[in-house]
């Protein structure tokens, strides 16, 4: 997804994150996040043009460019490339196998990759989080890492899917967690496929790796 595209996490009719405010808009982290967002938008336009030309050349050259038939088929099917950035790489995946699973009353399940040492966000507070959203097979359909900046939203306010809201509320700043989100807490209407993004069926389970980077204003007060 391009950085300027609306996030898949926002339900229809929600306010955009650019309209969100925080109690401490003069904090260095808040200002830095806004500066990064502006710079990222400019850079993404340049990168998008270069990327499109490169992909077109690769598709035309085919075998002579080093692409296998399976790679071309995967691209045509809208599957994500193998080199997308992740919050949990191969070594992390192995360690995660030994981490106990926690199941909540709603049916949400999660494993803590790293327990944070900062505060937990109160309901309604703005948070800055990185995420990698996947279908159960591990194919990525959305990611803040590809956009180049954390995603800002008010947790517990219905601005993201229910499973993500619930999963972040019990995290601490600096923590990293894998959320196994059941269908009823994910995307009721599903998501259509697109180049580099697999289809998400309505009410189907999804997996989110989430890193709670900071809570603007609150984490500074706690330090």
Image (cartoon, rainbow, N blue to C red):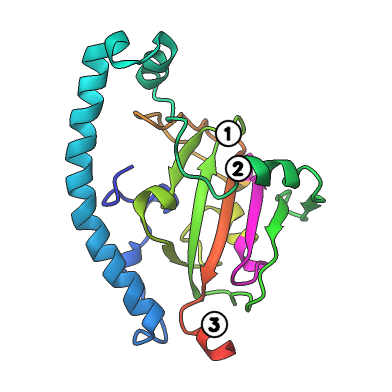
Residue at image point 76% right, 55% down: 104
Left or right, 14 with reference to 220: left
Residue at image point 18% right, 48% down: 45
Q: Which numbered disc flags the more N-terminal residue, 2 or 1?
A: 1
The circle on residue 211 is none
Left or right, 206 with reference to 67: right
The circle on residue 138 is 1
Q: Which residue is mark 2?
A: 207
Cα distance, mark 3 to mark 1? 32 Å
Residue at image point 59% right, 88% down: 222
Residue 78 vs residue 200, the one in the foreground: 78
- The part of the chain drawn in magenta is 168-184
Q: Is residue 200 above or below residue 217?
A: above
In front: label 2 or label 3 = 3
Residue 181 vs residue 119, the one in the foreground: 119
The quadrant in which residue 50 appears is: top left
Q: Which numbered disc flags the more N-terminal residue, 3 or 1?
A: 1
> Would you say residue 182 sits in the magenta stretch?
yes
Asked if the residue under mark 1 is in contact with the one under mark 2, i.e. CB atoms within 8 Å, the reply is yes
Q: Position of residue 44 (x, y in %)?
A: 24, 50
Left or right, 86 with reference to 146: right
Q: Which numbered disc flags the more N-terminal residue, 2 or 3?
A: 2
Cα distance, mark 2 to mark 1? 8 Å
Secondary element at image label 3? helix
Secondary element at image label 2? strand
Q: Position of residue 114 (x, y in %)?
A: 68, 61
Q: Which residue is mark 3?
A: 219
Identify the image quadrant of the N terminus: top left
> Would you say residue 32 sits in the magenta stretch?
no
Mark yes or no: residue 154 visible. yes
Residue 9 vs residue 106, the one in the foreground: 9
Identify the image quadrant of the C terminus: bottom right
């Amino acid at each position: 997804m391009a950085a300027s595209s609306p996030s898949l996490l926002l339900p229809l009719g929600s306010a955009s994150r650019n309209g969100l405010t925080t109690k401490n808009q003069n904090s260095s982290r808040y200002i830095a996040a806004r500066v990064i967002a502006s710079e990222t938008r400019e850079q993404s336009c340049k990168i998008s043009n270069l990327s499109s030309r490169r992909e077109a050349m690769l598709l035309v050259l085919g075998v002579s460019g080093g692409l296998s038939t399976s790679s071309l088929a995967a691209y045509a099917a809208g599957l994500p490339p193998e080199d997308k950035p992740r919050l949990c790489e191969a070594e992390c995946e192995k360690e995660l196998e030994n981490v106990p699973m926690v199941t909540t009353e709603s049916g949400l399940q999660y494993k803590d990759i790293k327990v944070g040492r900062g505060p937990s966000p109160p309901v309604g507070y703005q948070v800055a989080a990185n995420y990698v959203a996947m279908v159960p097979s591990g194919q990525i359909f959305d990611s803040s890492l590809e956009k180049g900046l954390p995603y800002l939203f008010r947790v517990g306010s219905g601005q993201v899917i229910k499973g993500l809201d619930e999963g972040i509320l019990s995290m601490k700043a600096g923590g990293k967690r894998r959320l196994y989100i059941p269908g009823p807490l994910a995307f009721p209407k599903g998501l259509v496929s697109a180049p580099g993004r697999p289809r998400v069926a309505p009410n189907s389970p999804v997996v989110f790796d989430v890193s709670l980077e900071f809570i603007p204003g609150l984490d500074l007060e706690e330090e």
